[in-house]
Image: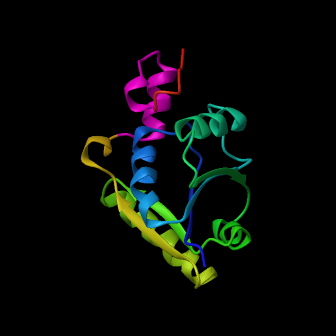
Amino acid sequence: MSKIAVFPGSFDPITLGHVSVIQRALPLFDKVIIAIGTNSQKQYMFDLKQRKDWIAGAFAGEKKIEVDIYQGLTVDYCEKKGAHYILRGLRNQQDFEFERSIAQMNKKLNDEIETIFLFTEVEYAAINSTIVRDIIRNGGDAQQFLPKNIQIT
């Protein structure tokens, strides 16, 4: 059985913090699926195709990475993809409390899927997509928080 992990998120946009967690998870799994969740009630800054292209570009040439789009429950998506692991990055105590609740609910929904937490490296702990979007929206330079393949003008 292959060890497949799903790393779900909106990735609006993907940041160096996300990239770091994914790169550090690669030795643990046979495949990591970066799954862009869609929520019709959420207003995104970047369209779905752009986000998918940016993620694919950030991991170009990495054979263990798949980039996909999904709707609905993450555990249902995991089951469909044959994934037994959900990968999540934690920056701080607030992330832990939030993610723990989700992991416990996911475990109740499907007890064959485990959530794996990786702590964000210290240099990326303050980075999140919400802050990056705010920097971009207000004309600041967010390039230092983004993979090199992403050029926002």
Q: Is residue 15 above or below residue 86?
A: above
* Residue shown at the point (46%, 32%) measured from the top left: 147
Judged left or right of residue 103, residue 69 is: right
* Residue shown at the point (44%, 63%) measured from the top left: 98
* Residue shown at the point (42%, 17%) measured from the top left: 140
Region rendered in magenta: 127-146
Judged left or right of residue 105, residue 126 is: left
Looking at the rendering, in which quadrant would you find the C terminus? top right
Q: Position of residue 32 (x, y in %)?
A: 56, 59
* Residue shown at the point (25%, 47%) measured from the top left: 122
Q: How is the image coloured?
A: rainbow
Q: Count of labels shown?
A: 0
Q: Is residue 124 above or below residue 109?
A: above
Q: Is residue 100 above or below residue 127?
A: below
Q: Is residue 136 magenta?
A: yes
Residue closer to the observer: 2 or 74:
2
Looking at the rendering, in which quadrant would you find the N terminus? bottom right
Q: Position of residue 59 (x, y in %)?
A: 54, 41
Q: Is residue 101 above or below residue 32?
A: below
Q: Main secondary structure of the magenta part?
A: helix
Q: Position of residue 82 (x, y in %)?
A: 67, 72
